[in-house]
Amino acid sequence: MQTLSSIWETELQKLIAQRIDDLRGQLEANNYETVAEFRHVMGQIVALRHVADELIGDAGKRADQRNR
């Protein structure tokens, strides 16, 4: 049985993945006038991956430790 916390984490992971896909689509369209705009989108993707890959897991571990 999934807990509310695990459901929330799963849904957040889905939202992050969707946002990364949307940003990749923007990069593929390449409608940027400056390199700074392009880099900004790339930075957003990197930040979202960091949240998805590391911070969500770390938060889950901390929450599990608090429940003990």
Image: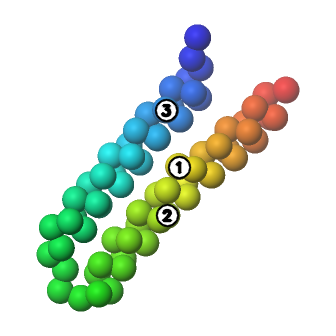
State the residue position of label 1. Answer: 52
Where disc 3 sits, the SS reads helix
Q: Is residue 4 above or below residue 58?
A: above
Q: Residue at x 38, y 71 (%)?
A: 42
Q: Residue at x 63, y 52 (%)?
A: 54
Position in image of residue 16 (x %, y %):
41, 48
Residue type, numbered disc 2:
Ala
Disc marking residue 10: 3
Which image quadrant for residue 39? bottom left
Inter-mark Cα distance, 2 to 1:
9 Å
Position in image of residue 63 (x %, y %):
72, 36
User: For mark 1, does the 10 Å Cα neighbourhood hold few (<14), some (14 to 19), or many (20 or more) residues?
Assistant: some
Circle 3/circle 1 CB separation < 8 Å: no
Residue type, numbered disc 1:
Ala
Circle 2/circle 3 CB separation < 8 Å: no
State the residue position of label 2. Answer: 47
Which image quadrant for residue 51? bottom right
Image coloring type: rainbow
Label 3 or label 1, whichever comes before in sequence order: 3
Residue type, numbered disc 3:
Thr
Disc marking residue 25: none
